Image (cartoon, rainbow, N blue to C red):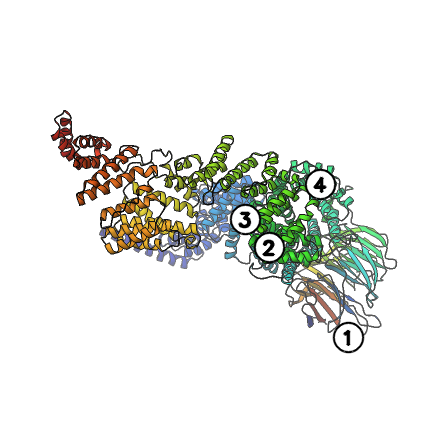
Amino acid sequence: MLKSGEEHEEDLEKQRAAVVELRELEKSVEANPDDPFLRFNLAVCLWEKCECKEKAAEHLVVAVKLNPQNATAFKYLGHYYYEKEKARALKCYQRAVSLNPDDFQSGDALCDMLDQRLGYIHLHYNRCSEAVSTLQHAIRGFPTSPDLWEALGLAYQKLGMFTAATKSYGRAIELEDRRVFALIQSGNIFLTLGNFQKGVEQFQRALEISPQNVSANYGLASGLLAWSKECMNMGAFRWGASLLEDACTVTDKIAQLAGNFSSIWKMHGDIQLNYAKCFPWIEDDENVEFDVETFHASILTWKQTCYLAATSAKKSYQRALHLAPWQANLYIDIGIASDLISSMNENYGQDQHPWQLSEKMVLGALLLEGDNYEFWVALGCLSGYNALRQHALIRGLQLDVSLAVAWAYLGKLYREEGEKSLARLAFDCSRSIDPSLSLPWAGMSADSQIRDMTPEEAFESCSRAAQILPVAEFQVGLAKLALISGSLMSSQVFGAIRQAVQKAPHYPETHNLHGLVCEARSEYQAAITSFRLARCAIISSGDTSKSCLQDIAVNLARSLSKAGYAADAVQECESLRKEGMLDSEGLQIYAFCLWQLGENDHALSVVRNLASSVSAMERAFAAASVSFICRMLYYISGLDLAVSSILKMPKEFLQSTKVWIVASAIHALDHSNRLALAVSSSQYSLLSHDEIIEKHYLTALANLVKHGSDYCLGFQSGISHVKNALHSYPNSNLLRNLLGHLLLSCEEWKETHVASRCCITEAPNCASKQGLKSGCEILGAGAVACYAIGNVDPKFSYPACGYQCLNGPGAVQELQKYMHQEPWNHRAQYLLILNLLQKAREERFPSNICVILERLILVALSNEFYSRESMSYQYQKFQLLLCASEISLQGGNIAGCIKHAKNASSLLIPNNYLFFGHLLLCRAYAAVDDYTNLQQQYIRCLELETDYHIGWVCLKIIESLRSTFQLKNPLRKLVHWPVLRAAFFLCHGVACVKLARQFCSSDYLSLAVNSLTSAHANSVIPLPIVSLLLAQAEGSLGLKQNWEKNLRLEWYSWPPEMRPAELFFQMHLLSIQSESGFKNSIQGGILSKLT
Amino acid sequence: MKLAGLKSVENAHDESVWAATWIPATETRPALLMTGALDETVKLWKSDELTLERTNTGHCLGVVSVAAHPSGAIAASASLDSFVRVFDVDSNASIATLEAPPSEVWQMQFDPKGTTLAVAGGGSASVQLWDTGKWKLIATLSIPRPEGPKPSDKNSSKKFVLSVAWSPDGKRVACGSMDGTISVFDVARAKFLHHLEGHFMPVRSLVYSPANPRMLFSASDDAHVHMYDAEGKTMVAALSGHASWVLSVDASPDGAAIATGSSDKTVRLWDLSMRAAVQTVSNHADQVWGVTFRPPGGPGPRAGRLASVSDDKSISLYDYS
């Protein structure tokens, strides 16, 4: 905005006046340099009018020197210094106020400054709560002063209000991001609160600003140390070790900066000590072949690293002690470090030198601070004399009776001494005081026998101990208990033993247990590696006790055989045998692997060896051996020898479930029933529910085998046995699924609709794959087999099957659920595709389902399973290709259809199925009127032949449609399948009608009448078209009465909204013929249809 | 009055060198420099080339203090675990092993006649006197507790005795404590005489002037060196100049100068007549734990020698003139 001319003029006028005034004043000051009044006036003029504060201040200083009573001059000076030197400003304001108490400007400024200052003073004298209120007051006056916020933060921190403190510090940092003090203090608070990561970040920020700051470096190192301890307690040793490495570089840097701070050396010692405890042994690349030397070397390097760290810790503690010998805890630290070092030496615990160094150092600490109970506990741990240890721990408890650690160590001590009941008391005490202490839990699990604990309970408490503190000893113990209580599979044990391998790689036990855990989890490759490592560890430790080596060798051989390395396993067993240490378990593995390798004679001799030692074994193991022997005999020498050896063996072995099951399985395969007496006499020894169900399962299978012919299993007797068994055990999934499976497999296909009803689709996560097929598979297969998928809407099709398949519509959903649960299961995918195809077929191939199907089939066919040679996979592939072909045919993509069908027909499967591939080709060629190819395929079909009636029916339809081929009549003899009978008769009838029309022959007509009548009689519900055709045929034969009757039947066999125009026309003809009242109703119907 | 560097041995020990003293010359050999270090060894060095004469091992922890008998025949070394090993200098045969409770052996010094070994008793707040003939404890000079008869653990750690010095006439023993006080004892009566005050941080090193038996120099963590009239209970002067803790002090044999070593990594030479530092040597890379003047006598060069040892594992030898 422009100023008006007048205003502008005025401004200029003022400026001019000011300059004139200034000149005059300057002149007069020059003339009278000692006149304070003139100088003051000049200064005010400079200050107010020329904004020249520097110059004004100079004059003011002179003025107040000449006249120290000028309050206003002091006020101006106060303003001047306010921004620059607070202390001077304060003095000026004070002077101004004392000279002129009414000067409110100076007074205000003074108050503000004093508030601020008072806050600092309070803080300095540790009067924190006063400081907080004063500082808050001051902050109202100076809300953007980072100093005030920082001071407030400090006051809060001293009061222990950490959250408020961090907020205040945060504000200070926000206002000025180079606030090192605020950053460091908030870092310290985060460390106190246990938020190490955030604390470390704060220190790092502080160090970016001031890299030489000792307290920031110290904070960073202690943050990293605390963080790494947290990692160690979680068991993340590698992470912890890397944090400690970082921390170590930081402390090295501080030691350079301030080498005479004992706390820094103590920190360095702590870091190194933790590093020595935490540094994990890292397994070499698992693929690399290792031998004893490389293993030994890697263990040595690991030990060396730990040892070096421990010695370095000891040295750092010594430095700290040298700098501050009056600090008692440093003696303890040296004691702990030297104890760790001596425990790393090979001959630890062998020479009980009087006055061990560690013990003596702890005594040094106690001399300085005898009332520190932690020092007493340390003495109790580090001393070599049990009496002294007990004394020290009890002394610690006298000082603080609720010292859980002391109780725990006391318990450990008593346990070592064999005072089990005292140990138990001490552990219980400790646990009740502090349940988050790991040692009492471990002690509890170790004392499981005295405490009457089950192995499961012992395992639980040990797992708690290992969870609280991931120490290798606890973890190894946990794995052992898991072995006893049978929970080797649990991932808790797996994690624990993995950590134990990192921390105690020199114990063969660790590797052995690791191997066992891996084996239990079916990771045989890893198990083999671990067992080999265990052997290396034994050899490199120099302790070559035979029994351990033997156990490990047996474990290794077992894992090798499980992983499929039979030859290696045999080698292991042979070397064991040379040593003479092949026990019965080893013999079993040996025999099994020999058999796998095909060395049957050798295997048999080993089995004989085993058999000779059975009588000396304990019961449970003998049973396992016997059942193994029976199985081997069956596999190697065949049924007869197995049967005779079972007959020969003592009867009490059959009391064992394992042996009984093997025996009855062999019995099932034996047609001459030689074992009947033996098996049935001891079947009453089976007690548990599961065992009895198992028995029924076996018997049912036995019935299948025994009552079947050479080509066909005896399904009926099997089914009836399972049905009977189900009466007693209605909720056994195993039996239900077996029944479903048998019903489906049954050749007659009468009861497929029952199959899906009798099985239970398992609850999700039901991992145990018992039996032959899962419930879902049976459901899916049943739905495919039972043609009616349960379409309730007759708009699409007419159910050909009289049985109502109850869960039919749910099958597709059920299979989708199945596939969602197990997306890797190709079987689920396959069944879903088949079910969807049926659905699509029923609904006349709607495009949406076709698209889904195309994609599903594409995905399914890409599965590698289908490239396998196995018959069942090839069959499935064939089916999938047919589906794809069918979809292409229905979608009008004849080329695709032919391609898929040709692919399908090129597969190596029985002719019985291959027929359908060529049938589809026939249909495809028929659709494009390619008669030469059609004929070829037709002949190929006739060559291949099939047992499936529907195939012939379809072939006949094609034949009749084209009518280029000679009509043969091989069909009649095939028609004995009730479900299809109606359809067949219908087809035959249609064909005959067509032929009759072509050749004008009444013979065909009467044939057609016969067929159609049969179709009508055989259909469950009135089939459409049948009656219409029948009416036509009979009408052509001149039987007008029948024509009329059949037309009427036809009328009612259609749903009202679907009646075809043809029918209306026929009915119209009928109504013209007949004069009954029926006519009107028909006309009404026609009218409504026309409109 | 100046120091001139003669020889420096880098990595003389594997770890920080913490203690040094000269073993006086005997008729058969010149004076030797004895150093003790964190690497648990004691080493003997021949002047002026600083060739390693011998390495003594056997301590379990770092060597904090070494002392030489005035005769030059025997010497003692003490480590952090409070074992004092007394050995024959020439043969390295152990003469005695004195054991004290941990934390109760710190600095040591033989009396000028060589009959007694005084040991600064650390946490026991006392000075132990050992007979050098039978190696028996003959007296314990305890600092009286100011708080009355009730002993409190906290107090004893305040009076933690770090340093000890014999007066040249052998009548007095002075000891320096962690709280900065210096206590003076009458040896003959085994009696505490008085405190010398002025320091407020640990006194790590004490030495009497060889020229003036009343004059005591003290080095403290408060970065000052004090001169006391030990009999008259008065502080004569305070010498300031070090930037950090003064760890060690020694008086020159002529009594005209003192040398100090400090955490600020320097060695300073102080002219007592000017009461000021005349020279600052900063060839060490880490804090200087010990400075020691070679005592006069014996064959070989007569010139003054000063040795200093440091955390940087090195030993330096200077010509003092």
Image coordinates of residue A129 in percent, x first then y, are 55, 39
Quote the CA–CA distance across marks 3 and 1: 61 Å
Quote the CA–CA distance across marks 2 and 1: 96 Å
Q: Nearer the viewer, mark 4 or mark 2?
A: 2
Q: Number of labelled discs? A: 4
Callout 4 amino acid: Gly
Q: Earlier in the sequence, mark 2 or mark 3?
A: 3
Q: Earlier in the sequence, mark 4 or mark 2?
A: 4
Disc 3: which residue: A196
In the rendered image, residues at marks 4 and 2 fall on the same chain:
yes
Image coordinates of residue A150 in percent, x first then y, are 51, 47
Kindly identify which numbered label has been placed on residue A958.
none
Disc 1: which residue: B301
Who's the residue at 33% across and 43% down the image?
A949
Q: Are marks 4 and 2 in contact (CB under 8 Å)?
A: no
Compare residues B59 and A887 and report the one nearer the observer: A887
Callout 1 amino acid: Pro
Q: Is residue B166 visible?
A: no
Provide the chain ID for the residue under circle 1.
Answer: B
Callout 3 amino acid: Phe
Image coordinates of residue A900 in percent, x first then y, are 32, 53
Disc 4: which residue: A411
Provide the chain ID for the residue under circle 3.
Answer: A
Q: Is A324 situated left or right of A910 in this image?
A: right
| Residue farthest toward the bottom in the current orientation of the protein | B300
Callout 2 amino acid: Asn
Disc 2: which residue: A600
Q: Nearer the viewer, mark 2 or mark 3?
A: 2
